[in-house]
Amino acid sequence: MTGARRKGTWRVAAAVAGTAIAISVVGLVVASGSQLDVTNGPPFVQDTSRCTNATLATTGFASGGGRNWDRVRLVGVPDACAGLPISVVVYRAAGELATGTGTAAAGTVDITTGNYRSNRVTGVALLIGGWGVPTTWTPGGTVVSLRSFQNGEYVTAASTTSPLIADSTTIGTNQQFDLIINDDGSVSLRAHSNNRYVCAEDAGASPLIANRTAIGLWEEFTLINNPDGTVALQSLANDMYVCAEDAGASPLIANRTWILEWEEFYLVFD
């Protein structure tokens, strides 16, 4: 590119004369997942080559649950992108919802953004090192594990007939759950072991078990942030807190009216 560079309104259309160009600007308006309009800011020409041509998976979630989310997770960031600046725009059809910045690392990267409503998101626009990177968006796809504060072991959902119990020292498929944010702000847990939702069986009278194919009241919980950094789960079926019964020796059950050590868990983002 030669000659004077004009400031003003630019549209990203194509590389010029075989020269790849990346533009970092103020005033990004996302028209669709494949079209970016750049307005009200001068362009910055990036001379380095892009670190990846791959499509990266993104998902969003809240730091402590709830309807208002404040994070975007990038999955599968390649080694070549490590150390480069990241910029994300969470958007819907009508425009921007939230933005965030950070630094890339190989693998999984979490970016803190402004608050946004999960049910309004249609996609994420992503820049790494000043280059646009294509993305896919999966709402509510955050994978978590629960570690009991009382015995330090991870909660296991072994099958549709085995109640949840904090009995594992490592995280595997049986200890992983999809954290689902429901429209009312409650959360549900879908076990990776069998793709079933965790249920407070018998309206909480029986231990928690991952055996449901749909989300109803028994499968909904309020995620509570405790002052010590742990979380508690309050069943919407009976308003009781989930407990690692007998200091974790017995299955989890929603039968407590208080939050003490047996009712506290660490929420681990896998």
Image (cartoon, grey):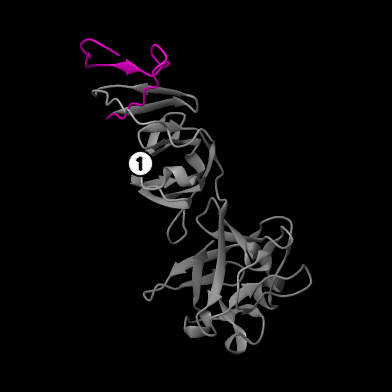
Determine the residue positioned at 41% across, 45% down. Answer: 116
Q: Please provide percent x and percent y for residue 167.
A: 64, 80
Determine the residue positioned at 36% across, 74% down. Answer: 227
Q: Secondary structure at mark 1?
A: strand
Q: Is residue 121 left or right of residue 101?
A: right
Determine the residue positioned at 28% across, 16% down. Answer: 9
Quick check: is 36 in the magenta stretch? Answer: no
- Image quarter of the C terminus: bottom right
Asked if 12 appears above or below 187 in the picture, the reply is above
Tell me if mark 1 has few (under 14), some (14-19) or many (20+) residues whose alpha carbon lies within 10 angstroms of its own.
many
Asked if 119 appears above or below 268 in the picture, the reply is above
- Image quarter of the N terminus: top left
Q: Who is closer to the viewer here, 42 or 28?
A: 42
Q: Main secondary structure of the magenta part?
A: loop
Which residue is the extreme one toward the bottom? 246
Q: Who is closer to the viewer here, 251 or 155?
A: 155
Q: Is residue 181 left or right of residue 230?
A: right
Highlighted magenta segment, given as a residue range: 1-26
Determine the residue positioned at 44% across, 73% down. Answer: 230
Residue of label 1: 99
Give the mark count: 1
Q: Please provide percent x and percent y for residue 89.
A: 39, 37
Q: Who is closer to the viewer here, 183 or 192?
A: 192
Asked if 133 appears above or below 148 in the picture, the reply is above
Q: Please provide percent x and percent y for residue 201.
A: 70, 71
Q: Please provide percent x and percent y for residue 22.
A: 36, 26
Q: Amino acid at mark 1?
A: Thr
Quick check: is 9 in the magenta stretch? Answer: yes
